[in-house]
Amino acid sequence: MSNNITNAIMGLCVADALGVPVEFMQRSKLKADPVIDMRAYGTYNQPAGTWSDDTSMTLCLLDSLANGLDYDDIMKKFHQWFDEGAYTPYGETFDVGNATRKAINRYASGTAALECGGKAEGDNGNGSLMRILPILFYLQSQYGSEINEEAFDIIHKVSSLTHAHQRSLIACGIYICIASEITQGIGLKAAIQTGTQKAMQYYRNNPEFTHELKHYARLENKDFEKLPEEQIKSSGYVVDTLEAALWCLLNTNNYRDCVLKAVNLGEDTDTVAAVAGGLAGLYYGYDSIPPQWLAVIAKRDYIESLCDKLQTAQGN
Ligand SMILES: [Mg+2]
């Protein structure tokens, strides 16, 4: 089994599950006892293979896109996840970010879907970046591999459902541009470099974003991958998460090493790993994911069936 959708989504989900038992753990602690395999219990006391909000919200978007692009329907599914435990491993929602919680509560109180996301500078957690990846497949079915003006607008709107500040929109734009380059079969480093350049070019030409670009300056530096680990933060701040995920992709050469490196950076382990793992899965493919990790993933068949559903809907 191998298609871009399954590669990316299972790459993201397995990485999320690797990070869940050690979420919030400090890097120094993980140095002494690094994660090298799928663990159980820990932070949320869940069995091995339990994935979290990162995967749940990704599945909401994936499932919604199988019926076309409908922002209200995506938000409805986020609400079902939050309120009813839909799209979860065991019918129970745990691990919800603040900005996401607030946005879903606004939706529940009658706010229009595209107005729900927080716009303040403090609303720049990684909560939209961690779930944006499925939009790539919709955009490619509509516009091909080039992320054009309309495609950027859609990426931004999907982010805005929960995270509407320009900094979060840019993170999602850079990430999807890189993902799109990966599917073009150029090398991973070339895809990260080209995708970043194309996204930054777009934002540089759009006055509403130019004042935010300084926050992404390190990613444009050719020597970014050579930064020492001490200079890579793995917090839940969207810029830190995107940097950390790309740094792990640039400093490893297979799926396993990439996602373990991400988890072992500590702090927001599941999300940094999920953001890295989605692209690692897309690049290295499903068969590169250790089978013993896939074997314990909760509701694996269900997730793969949702991937197939979108694949079929797009006639690929
Ligand atoms: Mg999580």
Image (cartoon, rainbow, N blue to C red):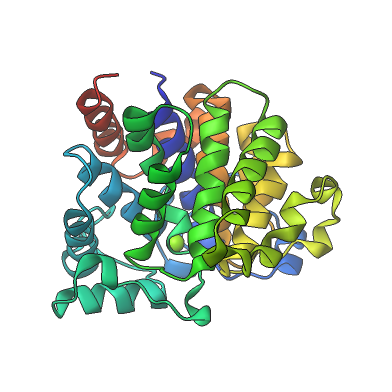
Up-down relation of residue 139 to residue 89 (above or below): above
Residue drawn at 22 percent across, 23 percent down: 312
Q: Nearer the viewer, residue 192 or 84?
A: 192
Residue drawn at 51 percent across, 33 percent down: 180
Rendered location of residue 175, percent (x, y)? 54, 47
| Ligand 1 quadrant assignment | bottom left
Quadrant of res 8: top left
Placement of the C terminus among the 4 image quadrants: top left
Up-down relation of residue 181 to residue 239 (above or below): above
Tell me if 278 is positioned left or right of 114 in this view: right
Up-down relation of residue 194 to residue 285 (above or below): below
Task: Kindly tell me whether residue 132 is visible in this rendering.
Answer: yes
Rendered location of residue 257, percent (x, y)? 68, 39
Placement of the N terminus among the 4 image quadrants: top left
Residue drawn at 58 percent across, 26 percent down: 284
Rendered location of residue 137, percent (x, y)? 37, 34
Task: Kindly tell me whether residue 35 is visible in this rendering.
Answer: no
Tell me if 285 is positioned left or right of 133 in this view: right
Residue drawn at 67 percent across, 55 percent down: 244
Q: Report how many numbered discs are placed on residues in the image.
A: 0
Q: Nearer the viewer, residue 113 or 10?
A: 113
Rendered location of residue 105, percent (x, y)? 23, 78
Tell me if 288 is positioned left or right of 28 in this view: left
